[in-house]
Image (spheres, helix red, strand yellow):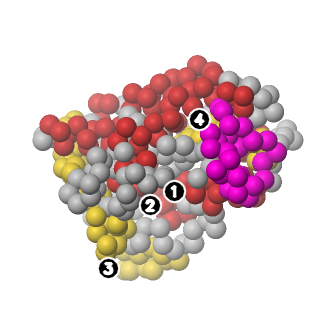
């Protein structure tokens, strides 16, 4: 392995960068948080100071012209993901882009095409793929422990109802976010589904705004048939002051319950034998993602999960929105 320090530029200075991405870059031993890019640098002075970058840019282009920047982490609203990623790739930078990858699958596909054309690395910040608790499910699937998988159930219900005119409320504006609860938090769960099972065969969905005065959905319910015939039910809601976040994978021989899915426990049942496992999460949720990307650059390999992997969740979301509009079942696996 060649000795190298990876100089990062972070585009966008919000909560995720301040609480997770910035600290992950600082903690990674071969990384430097070299630059921050914020069009509101004056208003974000305190946040930027806490990140302690060596340089601050107020526009993307001067940062991309800086030959010292090796990797770019894009943490801006979703409508900026595709243009900023493509510009960064064409400038010769490797890129990690926040989820969801883009406003739609067409944009995501173009991002992947440019990554291939330029020979640069592209990853999407679906960091849960790196967590041991979700790897347990993948390992069980790979070994065939479940027997025939017959049901996958995901549910996420919480309350998110900001004033659409409040600063930072871009998530409830469709032209900025691409969608509501499905795009913001459902995408993480759909990414896990795609990692474990690939794209579904077909789906039918109901996507609505039931409670809030937003132009994005606060409710989405989905039925899917997965590629091997297993059934999937998913419900994602921003309009309940009660809370749940759960994932269940059920097979003829075994099942796994992750409830809460981001907790530190898993219930693994094989036949009638029930095992309660303690599976701690990473101290910093983003660290394994950042570490793998840095290792990929230093070791001159691809990241463990690529832009093409990250595109799957966006393809599923496109199909969910289309099915709801058409009020009909939609074939999905042909989109691969």
Name the residue carrying label 4: 122
Q: Residues within 10 Å of mark 1 (few under 14, many from 20)?
A: many
As measured in the structure, the alpha-carbon distance from the residue carrying label 2 to the one carrying label 3 is 18 Å
Q: Please report whichever mark, 4 or 1, sits nearer to the chain's N-terminal start.
A: 4
Residue 112 image point, x, y percent = 51, 28
Secondary structure of the residue carrying numbered label 4: strand
Residue 55 spot, x, y in % from top left:
79, 41
Identify the residue under disc 1. 128
Establish if 152 lies above or below 274.
Answer: above
Measure the alpha-carbon separation of dots 4 and 1: 17 Å
Does 247 sit above or below residue 109? below
Mark 2 vs 3, N-terminal side: 2
For marks 1 and 2, the one nearer the N-term is 1
Residues at circles 1 and 2 in contact by the CB criterion of under 8 Å: no
**Visible residue check, residue 20:** yes
The magenta span reads 36-60
Please report contact status of discs 4 and 3: CB closer than 8 Å, yes or no: no
Which residue carries the number 3 mark? 272
Magenta-span inclusion, residue 58: yes
Where in the figure is residue 276, as x and y percent of width and height?
A: 45, 80
């Amino acid at each position: 392995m060649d000795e190298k320090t990876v100089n990062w530029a972070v585009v966008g200075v919000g909560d995720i960068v301040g609480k997770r991405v910035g600290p992950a870059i600082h903690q990674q031993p071969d990384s430097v948080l070299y630059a921050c890019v914020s069009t509101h640098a004056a208003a974000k002075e305190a946040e930027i100071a806490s990140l302690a970058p060596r340089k601050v840019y107020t526009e993307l282009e001067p940062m991309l012209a800086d030959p010292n920047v090796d990797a770019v982490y894009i943490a801006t609203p979703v409508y900026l993901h595709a243009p900023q990623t493509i510009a960064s790739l064409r400038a010769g930078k490797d890129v990690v882009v926040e989820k969801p990858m883009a406003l739609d699958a067409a944009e995501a596909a173009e991002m992947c095409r440019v990554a291939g054309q330029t020979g640069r690395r592209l990853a999407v910040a679906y960091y849960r793929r790196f967590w041991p608790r979700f790897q347990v499910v993948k390992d069980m699937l790979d070994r065939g422990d479940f027997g025939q998988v017959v049901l996958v159930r995901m549910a996420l219900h919480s309350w998110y109802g900001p004033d659409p005119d409040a600063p930072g409320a871009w998530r409830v504006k469709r032209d900025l976010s691409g969608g509501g609860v499905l795009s913001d938090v459902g995408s993480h769960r759909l990414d896990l589904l795609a990692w474990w099972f690939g794209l579904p065969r077909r789906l039918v969905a109901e996507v609505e705004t039931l409670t809030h005065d937003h132009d994005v959905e606060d409710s989405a319910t989905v039925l899917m048939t997965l590629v091997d015939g297993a059934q999937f039910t998913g419900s994602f809601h921003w309009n309940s002051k009660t809370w749940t976040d759960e994932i269940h994978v059920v097979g003829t021989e075994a099942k796994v319950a992750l409830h809460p899915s981001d907790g530190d426990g898993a219930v693994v049942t094989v036949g009638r034998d029930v095992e309660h496992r303690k599976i701690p999460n990473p101290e910093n949720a983003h660290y394994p993602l950042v570490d793998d990307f840095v290792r990929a650059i230093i070791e001159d390999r691809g990241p463990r999960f690529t832009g093409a992997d990250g595109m799957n969740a966006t393809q599923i979301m496109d199909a969910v929105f289309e099915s709801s509009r058409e009020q009909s079942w939609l074939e999905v696996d042909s989109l691969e």
